Image (cartoon, rainbow, N blue to C red):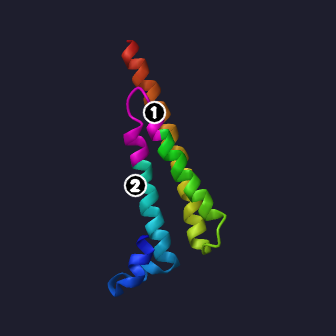
């Protein structure tokens, strides 16, 4: 969606190419990692883990598409970031449960 907007606005034209698409993907994926951690806080990490799964699946889909190599590379990193965010969510949830028992 953002790439289509960039294609229509001359001032955003650099973002419409492969490197721009890669930068937009990195931005969206970083936001997804932050959302995963924020949504997974507390006793129930399910929402955060679901968000991480959706982010990783979308990134995986891009690695299997006809996207340019720079976008595929960013998508692979994005999938890894989503996995790390999911791990952080699980660790924080376990820590939360441990504190509640004490």
The image position of residue 74, as x and y in percent, is 55, 64
Q: Where 46 falls versus 62 (above or below)?
A: above
Residue indicated by mark 1:
45
Locate residue 92: give its quadrant.
Answer: top left
In the depicted view, which residue is nearer to us: 63 or 9? 9
44 magenta-colored: yes
Q: Which residues are magenta?
A: 35-48
38 magenta-colored: yes
Task: Specify the farthest residue to the left.
Answer: 11
In the depicted view, which residue is nearer to us: 3 or 30? 3
Q: CA distance from mark 2 to mark 1?
A: 17 Å
Give the crowd class for mark 2: few <14, some 14-19, many >=20 residues within 10 Å: few
Residue indicated by mark 2:
31
Residue positioned 46% across, 75% down in the render? 20
Q: Earlier in the sequence, mark 2 or mark 1?
A: 2
Which of the image's four quarters has the C terminus?
A: top left
The image position of residue 24, as x and y in percent, is 44, 68
The local secondary structure at tag 2 comes to helix
């Amino acid at each position: 969606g953002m790439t289509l907007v960039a294609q229509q606005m001359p001032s955003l034209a650099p973002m419409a190419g492969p490197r721009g698409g890669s930068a937009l993907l990195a931005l969206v994926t970083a936001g997804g990692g932050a959302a995963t951690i924020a949504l997974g806080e507390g006793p129930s990490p399910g929402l955060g883990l679901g968000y991480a799964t959706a982010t990783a699946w979308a990134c995986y889909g891009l690695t299997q598409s006809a996207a340019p190599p720079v976008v595929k590379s960013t998508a692979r990193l994005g999938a890894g970031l989503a996995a790390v965010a999911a791990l952080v969510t699980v660790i924080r949830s376990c820590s939360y449960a441990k504190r509640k028992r004490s």
